[in-house]
Each structure stands twice: as C-alpha cells, then as structure tokens.
Amino acid sequence: QGTVVGSIAVRGHQGLLSAARAVTTWLSAGLSAKVVSSGVTCRGQCPEGTGQATTWAADAGLQVRPLSDQPLVIGVMVAHVGHRLREGTAHEADPLPSRLRLGASYRITRQLLEEEFGVRVLAEFEDHLRNPGRPQLFIASELTAGGTDQLFVRGGFIFADRRNQTDAAAIGFGLRYERLELGIARSLARGGPTLEQEPVHLTLGLAF
C-alpha cells in the first residue's frame, strides 16, 4: 500500500583464472575457469526472502588473424558453461546463461593518429547455447592512450532480442598499469529500469 517495509540488494560476483597462448602465428586459444556467485540480501521485511547461490563455470575460445598485413582479429567462444546455480539445499537449480559468441575487431592503424593513441572497433554476435534463436548484436569501440601502461575508454550498443529485452548502450573506462587492470562500466538501457537502478560493473585483473 505504498509503505516501505524493507530494501534488497542484488549482487553477482565472478572469480576467474584465465590462460591463453598462441598456437601458430595466426591462431590463439584461451580458457577461463571461474567461480560464479549470485545473492540477494535484505534489510527490513522481504516477503520473497534472501539467498545465496554459488557454482563453477568455464569459458573457451579461439582467435584467428586471417590477414597477416591487417590488424583484423576474428574470435569464437562458448561462455558460462558449467554447473547449475543452486541456492543452499534447494531441490531446484537455475541453469547458467551459456552463450555462443562470434566476434571481430579491427584496430585502426596508428598512422592515422598520434603514436601513443589507438582506436579499435568491434562487432559481436551472441546467441543462447542451449536454446538458440534469440540473438543479440553488439557494436563497440575502444580508445587507448599509452604503450605498456594504458588508459582506455570504451563505449558500445546492444541490438537486443525484441521478445524480452530492450536495446541498450554502455560506457566504461579503466587503467592498465604493469600487471594490474582496473575497469568500471555501466549500462544505459532505454526503457525498463531507470538509470539509477542499472548496475555498475567493476573489474579487477592481475596478469602473470
């Protein structure tokens, strides 16, 4: 009846360990193992309750450089393949959002810009792995400044499946210093949740 009785916080976390290497001069392969956690916490009265679920998953992919004289990279991967998310001792478990992705990126040559700047444009097609037929198209760009240590700004747009999702833009920026990478991003969905309700994505990475 309009009376606030409680507040909930929905959070998701992933811990990843990734490895990749060049197989040949034009082919690279990579694999990620990860722990996925999803939970809801409550302050006050929450009729639907709270809970925490944790599981494991994996990503695997290949990158191909078909043209030796062009900075074009084509990639294919499967993402979020693993055990279902089960909350506590519940009998039912939710399947992970397993996806198949096919993408391409092209780096604009540095002759067009100053030496310390780079621009990359990307496009990616994604569909459900278990139940295909609901594709999404992503387009994005990335501006980097620096050599080994870099600042980067990223922006993109999702052309979503019309049956249950809306188009959305996203922005992000970050820093890569020696072996440490820090990134922050936010979705700017049109329709649906307001901007204040959109989640912020924080990424911390350490390279070995």
Image (cartoon, rainbow, N blue to C red):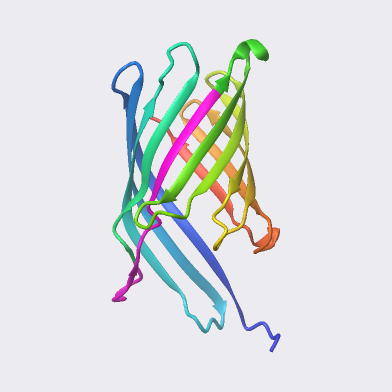
Compared with 143, 82 (above or below) is below
Residue bounds of the magenta highlight: 86-106
Quadrant of image for the C terminus: top left
Q: Name, please, the residue furthest toward the bottom.
A: 1
Left or right side of 200 for 25: left
- Residue at figure coordinates x 50%, y 71% from the top left: 41
Q: Is residue 208 left or right of residue 9?
A: left
The x, y position of residue 200, in whole percent, is 60, 52
Q: Position of residue 113 (x, y in %)?
A: 67, 15
Image position, residue 36 (x, y; %): 38, 55
Q: Is residue 100 magenta?
A: yes
Residue at horizontal 62 percent and vertical 49 percent from the top: 186
The image quadrant that residue 161 belongs to is: bottom right
Residue 109, relative to residue 5: is it above or below? above
Q: Residue 47 location, x and y as percent? A: 52, 84
The quarter of the displayed image where residue 138 is located: top right
Closest to the observer: 24 or 184?
24
Of the 4 image quadrants, the one containing the N terminus is bottom right
Left or right relative to 114: residue 19: left
Residue 193 part of the magenta-drawn span? no
Q: Nearer the viewer, residue 180 or 93?
A: 93
Residue at horizontal 29 percent and vertical 58 percent from the top: 83
Residue at position x 71%, y 85% from top?
A: 2
Relative to 55, does residue 3 appear above or below in the rendering? below
Q: Is residue 147 left or right of residue 15?
A: right
Furthest-front residue in this view: 133
